[in-house]
Image (cartoon, rainbow, N blue to C red):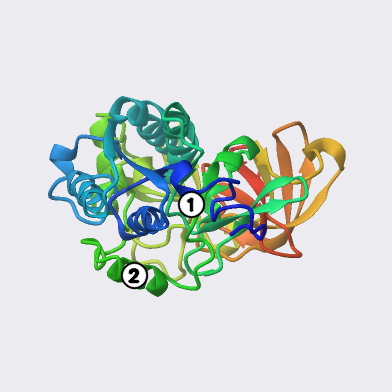
């Protein structure tokens, strides 16, 4: 919230009624509360929901955003709160820039994070441009993250509630996008507070469960989705120990991820084994003891830098990084290799670092997010 009394709660020097805000509404409780709160404050709210895939197939599916029932829920909230609501067909865009890459990444032995790509390439790109076309002053979302106005422009900060923080999924937000975005829930101490607000506004989604799955992956079954998108792509091959022994066969590399222990299909061994590498061209799943998962140096590309000084202005940056969304930040050193490439040295080796995942940078002195990049198949060691 702005400290200047001359500014409204979204940071503009004009009354809320003269401030148009497009709210990205998924149909869940978070974005619904954002829309209701801003409408109650008197803003000129326009709700927009994206149809991202065939929601005829999604109607019976629970636990995912942007399905048919969610579009209906978003519309009901808009009707109850008295602001316009639009549904935009982004199905082709979503398939081209998110789903296809997801399938190809898995086929290439990577472990992608499609929610980041959706924010980067759909919500904060095409939808944000749509908001500008609607003459909006800003776009608000229900993400749990904070935007602060710093001395050098807007900064991205972790949510007040560490358990709900979504910074890992928003690292690729650019400075230009950040200038236009608002995150009204980021300062709340807990999700219980959000649900209390939903009840106060008497929203029909007040008790709606949180989404758990990737929206286009029913029941978390990635392999089934990929086989449907790329028929015949799952080819059998050998499961090989790091010492060269053939331990068994698999039905396709797409069924495995780096760090996986369960479901390997090679029972009867005395010591636990983990997937340590995927050889797509050789159709091999390489397994070994846990210590082989330890990684100290990680190659990154497509880096989005949100620091104040230019990325290449220093030979190295001392930061904290997350290599998976569920892990706490750990101390690391970033060494730039180019405008958007770098090598990250983890001061304490991490296990299960996988190509296709994100590596997100944090200021060690506070809550600020300094950007991040994508882990790729360079030399990880």
Please give left or right for residue 200 compared with residue 3 in the image.
Answer: left
Q: Is residue 16 above or below residue 106?
A: below
Please give left or right for residue 157 compared with residue 232 in the image.
Answer: right
Q: Quadrant of residue 352?
A: bottom right
SS category of the residue bearing label 2: helix
Q: Which residue is mark 1?
A: 258
Residue found at x 87% / y 42%: 314
**Residue 172, x across and y down, in percent:** 58, 41
**Residue 113, x across and y down, in percent:** 45, 45
Mark 1 vs mark 2: give the one in front: 2
**Residue 139, x across and y down, in percent:** 47, 42
Towards the viewer: 358 or 118? 118
Q: Which residue is mark 2?
A: 195
Answer whether residue 301 is visible to the viewer in this image.
Answer: no
SS category of the residue bearing label 1: loop
Please give left or right for residue 335 compared with residue 133 in the image.
Answer: right
Q: Earlier in the sequence, mark 1 or mark 2?
A: 2
C-alpha distance separating marks 1 and 2? 37 Å
Residue found at x 73% / y 39%: 342
Q: Is residue 140 above or below residue 159?
A: above
Towards the viewer: 32 or 200? 200
Q: Quadrant of residue 229?
A: top left
Residue found at x 49% / y 57%: 184
Quadrant of the image containing the N terminus: bottom right
Answer whether residue 180 is visible to the viewer in this image.
Answer: yes
- Disc 1 crowd rating (10 Å Cα; few below 14, some 14-19, many 20+) is many
């Amino acid at each position: 919230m702005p400290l200047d009394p001359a500014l409204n709660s979204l940071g503009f020097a004009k009354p809320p009624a003269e401030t148009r805000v497009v709210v990205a509404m998924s149909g869940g409780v978070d974005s619904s509360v954002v829309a209701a709160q801003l409408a109650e404050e008197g803003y000129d709210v326009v709700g927009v929901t994206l149809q991202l895939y065939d929601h005829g197939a999604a109607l019976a599916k629970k636990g995912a955003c942007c399905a048919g029932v969610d579009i209906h829920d978003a519309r009901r909230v808009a009707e109850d709160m008295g602001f316009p609501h639009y549904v935009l067909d982004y199905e082709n865009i979503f398939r081209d820039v998110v789903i296809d890459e997801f399938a190809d990444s898995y086929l290439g032995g990577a472990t992608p994070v499609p929610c980041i790509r959706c924010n980067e390439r759909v919500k904060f790109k095409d939808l944000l441009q749509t908001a500008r076309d609607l003459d909006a002053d800003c776009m608000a979302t229900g993400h749990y993250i904070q935007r602060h106005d710093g001395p050098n422009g807007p900064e991205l900060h972790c949510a007040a509630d560490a358990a709900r923080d979504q910074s890992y999924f928003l690292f690729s937000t650019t400075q230009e996008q950040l200038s236009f975005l608002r995150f009204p829930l980021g300062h709340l101490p807990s999700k219980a507070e959000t649900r209390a607000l939903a009840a106060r506004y008497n929203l029909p989604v007040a008790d709606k469960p949180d989404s758990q799955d990737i929206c286009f992956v029913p029941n978390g079954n990635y392999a089934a989705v990929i086989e449907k998108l790329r028929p015949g792509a799952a080819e059998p091959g050998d499961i090989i120990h790091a010492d060269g022994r053939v331990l068994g066969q698999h039905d396709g590399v797409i069924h495995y991820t780096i760090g996986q222990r369960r479901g390997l299909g090679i029972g009867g061994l005395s010591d636990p084994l983990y997937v340590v590498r995927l050889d797509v061209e050789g159709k091999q799943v390489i397994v070994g003891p846990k210590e082989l998962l330890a990684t100290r140096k990680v190659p990154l590309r497509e880096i989005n830098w949100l620091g104040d000084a230019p990325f290449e202005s220093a030979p190295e940056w001392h930061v904290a990084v997350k290599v998976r969304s569920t892990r706490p930040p750990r101390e690391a050193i970033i060494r730039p290799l180019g405008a958007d490439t770098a090598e990250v040295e983890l001061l304490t080796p991490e296990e299960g670092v996988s190509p296709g995942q994100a590596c997100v940078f944090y200021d060690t002195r506070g809550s600020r997010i300094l950007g991040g990049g994508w882990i790729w198949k360079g030399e990880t060691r």
